[in-house]
Amino acid sequence: MSDIFDIYLLEGVLNGLLLGGLLALLSLGLNLVFGVIDVVWICYAELIMCGMYAVYYLHVQYHWPLLLAMLAAIGVVAVLGWLLHQLVIRPVLHAEPINQLLVTGGVLFFLQAAATLAFGIEFKNLGVTLPSVRLGEMSFSAARLVAFGAALGGVIALYLFLTRTYLGTAIRAISQDRSIMPLMGVDPARIFAITSALGGALAGLAACLLVLQYDIHPAIGLSFGPITFLICVLGGLGNMLGGFIAAFIFAQFIAVGGFFFAVEWGYVIAFIFFIAVMFWRPRGILGK
Amino acid sequence: MLRVAELSAGYGGFQALFDATLEVNAGEAVAVIGPNGAGKTTLLRAISKLIEPSRGTLTFAGQSLASLPAHAVVARGIAHVPENRRLFPRLTAEENLRMGAYTSRGAYTERLAQVYALFPRLKERRDQPAGTLSGGEQQMCAIARALMSGPKLLLLDEPSAGLAPVVVQSIFELVRRICAEGYTVLIVEQNIRQVLKVVNRAYLLDTGRIVRSGSAAELMAAPEIQKAYLGL
């Protein structure tokens, strides 16, 4: 009896690990943009929603091969991120933070409403069902395994880009001292635009992974937007390593809490933990 | 090499520099000296276009800098070591140097070797976050970062500021070596006694106006400088 108990607990922990990878990827783009540009994209999850629709339409309606549709969707959301910066963020770049929050909040509702108009409120799905993978007594969703692998790949690729290339180094540098970047021969406006496209591309990658597991509807952003935002805050907003750690902590609360009680209780415990951490470290685990 | 003619600049409604005219020739080391708030930093910021001059002309190597945005000035051959060093504190020393070479990546490896030859200490500290370096090391790193762009003209803003007296000596020694290597240098300093030992010529800036110019020896001997700034 106790053997079975342990193996299901292990399954819970491992599922938490898989979920953590996905949550880490979700937090990555938001943290990158905030860390560099100092603006919170409240509408981040709605960009992901657009990416999910892009995959759906290209694959299901236009019969593109799934991988190609996903690559295109990443490109589409990267362009959306770039447009968001050029059209909405740039004019308020030096405005009060509350104004910046409000404009991206406006974009959230705009995208939701636009998606409702354009795509309707019906739930859509790819109709792709990945099998579950059995490992001894335990079973894992293949979609989650794929998501975990892709998320880890995305994190590593981003890390290498930020540490090994001139552009990546400039992206890290600009978050530390914006005003002297021109002395390095770097045009800050260009770095901001590139960072926004990159943040969009990461949202697009998240969309490709979520679309394998969830139905698409115009309000889907609301079901993982808040949790993404909380993970970023928990890790220290703008701190990518913090977000990464926080994602795995959060996922363990959800998965293991869900194992001992019900799945909903997992979320309750995770949010109580979040609130407690906010009392203890208001700027997040690795916040400064 | 650099000609500044009747340059005025300021911040918003506040004018900090009035009709400054000066010249730096190739191979020269020139200082702009003066008290705190004289407009020295404003002058350098206007030359590298971090602020847009309100009046006057800037000519470098025969070409006007008027229409250039700040980030295009480096590629023309002007590197600016800003006031307070302004390293990227959480990048390593070597990553700071990489940023300095942003516009001239092809020459990175070669220049890195040159810069490490000039500052062996930086090579020891290459993987350390710049924010954890000592004040003197940070100044070396800031100068090295500027040299990484392979400049024709090096602008130095108060390299001795905020450093311990012993370190100040070694920084001026470094500046002397950089001048000896053939770099053209325009340096602004409050530490008049020290800087005049290093440069060929100097201008005295006071409340935004250039009030005197001459060879280093002339300025050192000038009665108003001896009285007001050297306390003799």
Image (cartoon, coloured by chain):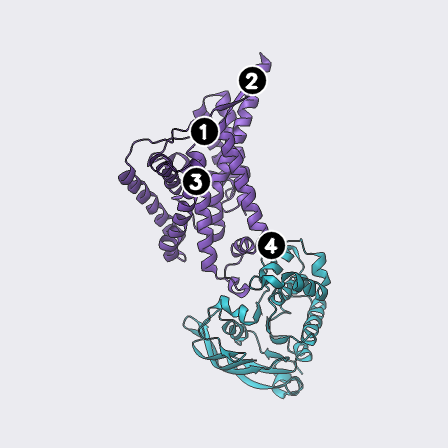
Chain colours: A purple, B cyan
What is the chain letter for disc 1? A
Residue named by callout 2: A137
What whole-number distance in Å separates the C-alpha atoms at marks 1 and 2?
26 Å
Q: Check if mark 3's residue and mark 1's residue have beta carbons within 8 Å.
A: no
Measuring 35% from the left and 50% from the top, which residue is drawn there?
A: A103
Number of residue marks: 4
Residue B170 versus residue A224 in the image, above or below:
below
Residue neighbourhood size for the residue with mark 2, other residues' Cα within 10 Å, grouped as few (<14), some (14–19), many (≥20): few
Q: Check if mark 3's residue and mark 4's residue have beta carbons within 8 Å.
A: no
Answer with mark 3 or mark 1, whichever residue precedes in sequence: 3
Residue B135 versus residue A224 in the image, above or below:
below
Residue neighbourhood size for the residue with mark 1, other residues' Cα within 10 Å, grouped as few (<14), some (14–19), many (≥20): some
Residue named by callout 4: B91
Under mark 4, the amino acid is Leu
- Disc assigned to residue A267: 1
Which one is closest to the eye, mark 1 or mark 2? 2
What whole-number distance in Å separates the C-alpha atoms at marks 3 and 4?
37 Å
Measuring 54% from the left and 30% from the top, which residue is drawn there?
A: A17
Q: Secondary structure at mark 2?
A: loop
Q: Check if mark 2's residue and mark 4's residue have beta carbons within 8 Å.
A: no
Q: Check if mark 2's residue and mark 3's residue have beta carbons within 8 Å.
A: no
Residue named by callout 3: A68
Where residue B226 appears, x then y in whole percent?
64, 84
- Snapshot quadrant of residue B194: bottom right
What is the chain letter for disc 4? B
Left-right relation of B179 to B155:
right
Under mark 3, the amino acid is Leu
